[in-house]
Amino acid sequence: RHTLTTLALHTLCIMHCALCLALAASTAFGAEAAPFVLASGGRSRAVIVPYGGDTNGVGYAANLLADYLGKIAEAPFLVADKPVPGYGTILVGAPYKAARPEELCVRVKDAQTLEVTGDGARGAVHAVMALVESLGVVVCAHDYEHIPHRRELALPGDYTQVDAPAMLWREAWSELQR
């Protein structure tokens, strides 16, 4: 009986060690995804493409992103109808199946594509603001924001941010006073 318990513990210990070694090997030898470069050397390295054109607020979200990225990197960002060869593509408003209302999703699809999207046009605008906030922008009030200046902007190749507003009804209090 004592031998069976010792054998079971010994086997369990060996299995645990093998699992730890496999995990360490996959982490050490696994290819890390290439980063998505937004700006380098004070120049934009990506163009912003509103999915489906300038409709339903997606164009607004694309221009908002271009404005903020331009201020951060101190370089102009182009909003284009389609990807531009030689530049990464920031796809704003790409098709996305949201699990929650107004959910946002910012994800590096590959080294050449960043998707900034969400549940409809509002989700895309929320995704734009989440992205620029992750780059250090702080919006304190409608007339004051802190924008850091960084000539080098990149996101890790495995970057993914998914979130949704905690409150669905977010209208201004003054609208209740009618």
Image (cartoon, helix red, strand yellow):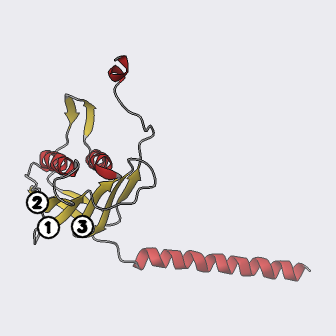
Q: What residue type is labelled 2?
A: Ala
Cα distance, mark 1 to mark 3? 10 Å
Badge 2 local density, few (<14 within 10 Å), some, or many (20+)?
Answer: some
Is residue 133 shown left or right of residue 76?
Answer: right
Number of numbered discs visible in the structure rendering? 3
> What residue sits 40% from the left and 54% below the top?
162
Farthest residue in the front direction? 178
- What residue does disc 3 label? 113
- Whole-percent x, y for residue 141 in the image: 26, 28
Q: Which of marks 2 and 3 is in front?
A: 2
Image mark for residue 80:
2
> What residue sits 35% from the left and 60% below the top?
96
Q: Which amino acid does label 1 sit on?
A: Pro
> What residue sits 33% from the left and 20% below the top?
174
Q: Which of marks 1 and 3 is in front?
A: 1
Q: What residue type is labelled 3?
A: Thr
Is residue 103 shown left or right of residue 24?
Answer: left
Q: Nearer the viewer, residue 54 or 63?
A: 54
